[in-house]
Amino acid sequence: MICMAVFACSSDNACEQFQDGTGQEISLVFEDLTHQIHDLESIGEMKSFFDAHPIIRDQFFEYGTLQPEGAFHAQVLRLITTPKVQEIYRASSVDKLEELLNQHRDIRDLLVYPYLSAKQGRSLYELHELFKSSRITSVNNLEQVGIYLAEHPKEYDLLATAFGFLTPADLDQENFETLKNPYVDTLYQEVIRLIDTGRLRFDLDQAYDRLSVHYPEHVAPKVQTVYSGFGKDIFISDSLLIIGLDYYLGPEASFRPNVYDYVKSRLTPQHLVPQIMQFTSLKFNKTNRSNRTLLDEMIYYGKALEFSRELLPCVDEHLIMGYTPQEMANAYTSEAVIWNYFLDNELVYSEKPLELTRYIDERPSVPEIDKICPGRIGQWVGWQIVKAYREETGVSFNELMEETDVQKILRLSKYRPRLR
């Protein structure tokens, strides 16, 4: 089993106290639902499970994104009343249809390619026959669209495929087939093999216990763990935390989420609890949303990272930051160069969206500063400023979370990194 937190413990009492989870009382309400999901044997059982867990249903299995039928009918009506679409439907031959589709590639990409690729053996000739016999272009209101599609299942299939429309029954079938897919079953087996849910429960319990020291009124959310074939990673509210464990299997997994490699590197068991704590910080991390400079963003994320460090004193900082050890070393080595770059280029108080994106958001690197400068470097610098502010002023954790004056934090931090 891979433990959910990686410890780099020193003589810090807070760390030593919680290093060993054995014998500790755990109060966190924790439900591992992965086995229950795996054991679903019919669509009926699956629907009953979803009825009992509506947030899992809507957030992790896409029912919350289902398009209303009326909206689908409105899309169809807009499409079929477009002159170029009506011309395509009236094409006198397959050759003429192909010619028109080459002229109107947006319609080809929307209507034709998805339909032909959805089922093996479909051809442009078959589609031309469908267009030629269709009367849908004479429909002129939403009620007629609904009636027409109900009476013509092949055209319904064509247009539903074009707009990605699914009924709840369609999605029931799709989700059940997904759960019974051998590849998804492999995900379940690897969730069991690679993630120690007992350790996960312990680490979350201890983190929330530390949070309650600072905020006694805070009640830890109920925690549920699931797998869904990469439907979602994390859902969090004041009362409920749901974790898609299949997202966090790490490099040993047979299948990984379809995300960029520099994001994928953080989707491991070791990164899970630090990420949850950063999500948790949203409720406590006060900020002034009326003015968003680069410094505002740096300090906001710096406070979120410090929030995680406070609640996870035994976790290596590179895991909290989501950097590799080498990326962390590069950032520390180049800290003065990075800060001077921000000063020399007058970026600290910039409000330009491109610059906020460049230095704060997800990127594999920041080559504008240096080819080895890791992405999200503005967040990392903000964290160093926040740490310096705490050390210089001795402010409490709660006072730090309440502080919204970023210029005050920068000024009192006396942040002046030295060249190394």
Image: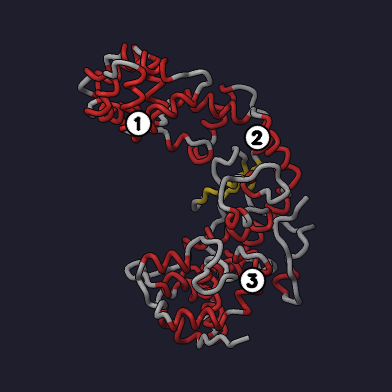
For disc 3, the marked residue is: 328
Q: Secondary structure at mark 1?
A: helix
Badge 3 amino acid: Met
**Is label 2 or label 1 in front?**
1
For disc 1, the marked residue is: 102
- Examine the rendered structure and indicate whether residue 55 appears above or below residue 316: above
Report if the CB atoms under discs 3 and 1 are less than 8 Å apart. no
Residue drawn at x 58%, y 27% is: 176
In the figure, is residue 303 to the left or right of 84? right
Badge 2 amino acid: Val
Q: Secondary structure at mark 3?
A: helix
199 or 305, nearer to the observer = 305
The tag earlier along the polypeptide, 3 or 1, is 1
11 or 163, nearer to the observer = 163
For disc 2, the marked residue is: 184
Q: Quadrant of residue 37?
A: top right
Q: CA distance from mark 2 to mark 1?
A: 39 Å
